[in-house]
Image (cartoon, grey):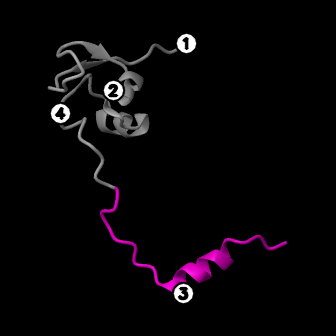
Amino acid sequence: MKPINMYVNRSTHPRMISGDKYSIKQISIICRLSGGCLHNRFGFKGEFNDDDLRSSRSANVWPILETKSDRLSASWLNRRLV
């Protein structure tokens, strides 16, 4: 069985002890970020900092540029053919 990767905390997060080791699962629970997001940010690093724990800004960055006809067309294209 593969051992769990542990990362050294170099952040100033108030709910974490500086210099202590945490798994991605623990960090995701504490910081309320997805494990996949953290995994991509950490890469092959052995430690993490405040930049790695920033909140995701992907929500509502680009406005949805759909018209009413686009939504109607998509609703018909997503239906089953049978």
Q: Amino acid at mark 2?
A: Ile
Residue name at image x 22 percent, y 20 percent: 9
> Which sits earlier in the primary sequence, circle 2 or circle 3?
2
Residue bearing the label numbered 4: 50
Residue name at image x 60 percent, y 82 percent: 72
Residue name at image x 34 percent, y 71 percent: 63
Q: Residues within 10 Å of mark 3 (few under 14, many from 20)?
A: few
> Which sits earlier in the primary sequence, circle 1 or circle 2?
1
Residue bearing the label numbered 1: 1
Residue bearing the label numbered 3: 69
Residue 28 position within the rendered picture, expressed as x and y whole percent measured from the top left = 37, 30
Q: Are marks 2 and 3 in contact (CB under 8 Å)?
A: no
Q: Residues within 10 Å of mark 4 (few under 14, many from 20)?
A: few
Q: Residues within 10 Å of mark 2 (few under 14, many from 20)?
A: few
CA separation in Å, label 1 and label 2? 26 Å
Q: Is residue 65 left or right of residue 46?
A: right
Residue 57 position within the rendered picture, expressed as x and y whole percent measured from the top left = 28, 52
CA separation in Å, label 1 and label 3? 52 Å
> Which sits earlier in the primary sequence, circle 2 or circle 4?
2
Q: Which quadrant of the figure contains the N terminus?
A: top right
Q: Is residue 37 left or right of residue 15?
A: right
Relative depth, front residue between 22 and 30: 30
Looking at the rendering, the stretch of residues picked out in magenta corresponds to 59-82
CA separation in Å, label 2 and label 4? 13 Å
